[in-house]
Amino acid sequence: MGGASIFNNVNNFLTGGDYNPDQWLNRPDILQQDAQLMQKLGINAVSLGIFAWATLEPDEGNFQFDWLDQTIERLDKVGVHVILATPTAARPMWLGLKYPDVCITSKDGKREYPKLRHNFCWTSDNYRDKSAIIIDKLAERYASCDTVIGWHINNEYGGHADWAHCYCDSCITNFQHWLKQRYDHDIDKLNDSWWTRFWSHTYQSWDQIRPGDHSVEALGLNWVRYCSDMVEDFLAHEIKHIRKHCSKPLTTNMHGHLQITDYVKLAKHLDFLSYDSYPRIYGIEDEDIKNLYYESLYLDAIRSLKPDTPWYLIESCPSLPQYFSPLRLKRPGVHNMLSLKTVAQGSDSVMYFQWRAGRGSIEKHHGAVIMHDSPTDTRVTREVAEIRTNLDNINQTLGSTIKSDVALIFDTESIHALEHNHGGPTAKQYREEVLKHYRALARLGINCDVIDQTADFSRYKFITAPIAYALQPSFATRIHKFVSQGGHFLTTFWSGITDQDLCISAGGRLGPLRDILGITSEEIDCLREDERILLEAEQDWLPPKTHSSTYSELVHASHAHVLASYATEFYAGRPALTLNYLGDGRAYYQAAALDLDTLRHFYNRLLTEAELTDQLADIQNGVLIKRRSNSTNEFLFAVNFMEDPCEVSLPTGDWHDLENNLVGTEVPLDSYQVAVFTQSCG
Ligand code: GLA
Ligand code: ZN
């Protein structure tokens, strides 16, 4: 039995990867071998032509599609689908030399000589025009080609953080225009919002505003917002030209931990989401486990951008990315575990960067399915073939999605805000705290969406927002509504500190969250690493003899109930955890930072109070449980991150393995095993 895919004529998981035959056109034997090997390994999809502009248009207006036609034909013969790329992430030399304005300008105002990739100016008319021409040509030519099932737009938009930022005059003028729109053409409004009287930064006109001065925090923050909007604008430009000719599903591959562009905005333009996943694992158990939870957090964030459709793992490394250090090979079973873990988290594919490694240039050592023109029967190719078989064995999970009653707020806006903020938590501390909450929920077997402050809250019963430091304009109002209508909400120390322009919230700490939480806040203490403050809790809200570490905030309960208090030093008697009843719901505040185990205990109680008891399980560290479902079945994936076998307690249910044998509540998991169970829905 097979599930449904979003692509026409596709009834199984996609396996395959980036395919760059343009690097091997003088080796017809290799091209032939590619097709045969793809067939042998059960590969059924490639992302094609991502960096091939120089081969597609070697001189301006000289279009060469024969090699692409032949490639697609060869792939079709062996049953390989094509996700065809727009080649706009890297451009031919002639383009940068003939039209220098297409090249990015660095911070010091220097127009760069053509080099690298992802290095174009976002407002260059020439780049827009030339990219439109090649996209039109491709889309027109392959719109009705059945082998082409979808489109891959550009590649990892933004590249590294700085490559999304062009400092040419045109980009800066456009930024000033963007600010004008954002602040209603009112320069005083901008000055007030940014607190520019500080150090005499008051702007008299829009053209005085230039990026690069970080003493006005909102300037830097709005510059990255603007750059992110330019990425979105360029994506829309590329899509517009595909859509002139073709309506097949399209994506752009997202990457890199939410820190560059605001994917919430990009996602709205895409038919399906795709992500490049390169979790860092080095063979040091604790570090690996932590990194795998980090990766899981990011995968859930991507998935949650379109929670009702599967996403696609479009790049991963079947061996080792060359930039890992140390370059420790994945142990047997690890690659399979990592791949199926992404499926557990909602992916309908396992694809790689890349199918065949090139013999030269800076990615020649990056682990690919086939290395250069080397032997082809290897540990990696055998594992790739094995994953195909494993995916076929769970084909009935295809098209299923993850439904969550619980959402964790973790967003690019907050990361950007903290990167530009002075004093208070760093972006790294924010990530670490969010990860701790994510891990606490994972240890309870909870399916958790990872959303931003603007998401639709009505889908959830419980929302948690660790360190909601900078509040988006309507966030508090929307949370107020969510809670009043019966939702349960938790937030923590360092929340509601500023507005979206990093000015302290009106009325002081917590800002508009004060009324929701029923508390006020005075100060926050950042503890030394070895410092602990004893906590005393009511009715099992925390385990006995628990301590606060890292942060201890001093709050007053104006009309909230106190669930736990500090018990020592000058904090003694001050609330550490509070609960406010508001309408039909509840708003909790965590003033004291808790360690992972304590947080897990706290969430167990919180989710029980939210009547989510039937979803709770007791999952050990290093094991991830995820549930996907479709209209008839629920699928439970249990992933063992660890080399050591273990036992996992499944949440309540009537779980069978996929061969329909009833399994108990405690199931053994082998080293790096991913086990899949099912039960019928309802
Ligand atoms: C990214 C890119 C690929 C390649 C890999 C190497 O994911 O999309 O083009 O550079 O990194 O890890
Ligand atoms: Zn520019």
Image (cartoon, helix red, strand yellow):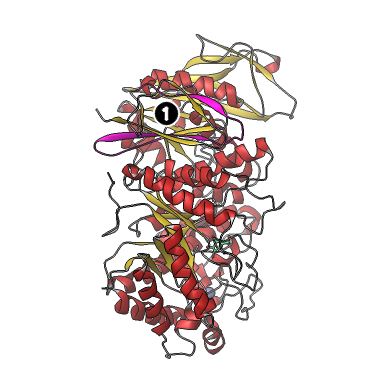
Left or right: residue 45 versus residue 629 is right
Indicate the quadrant of ligand 1 in the picture.
Answer: bottom right
The stretch in magenta equals: 627-653
Residue 356 occupies which quadrant of the picture?
bottom right
Q: Residue at x 32, y 48 (%)?
A: 309
Q: Residue at x 47, y 44 (%)?
A: 340
Where is residue 645 shown, x and y percent of the image?
57, 29
Residue 10 occupies which quadrant of the picture?
bottom left
Q: Which residue is label 1 attached to?
A: 489
Q: Nearer the viewer, residue 201 or 1?
A: 1
Quadrant of image for the C terminus: top left
Amino acid type shown at disc 1: Phe
Position above or below: 444 against 155: above
Q: Nearer the viewer, residue 207 or 499?
A: 499
Left or right: residue 378 versus residue 463 is right
Is residue 28 located in the magenta-colored stretch of the structure?
A: no
Q: Nearer the viewer, residue 115 or 535?
A: 115
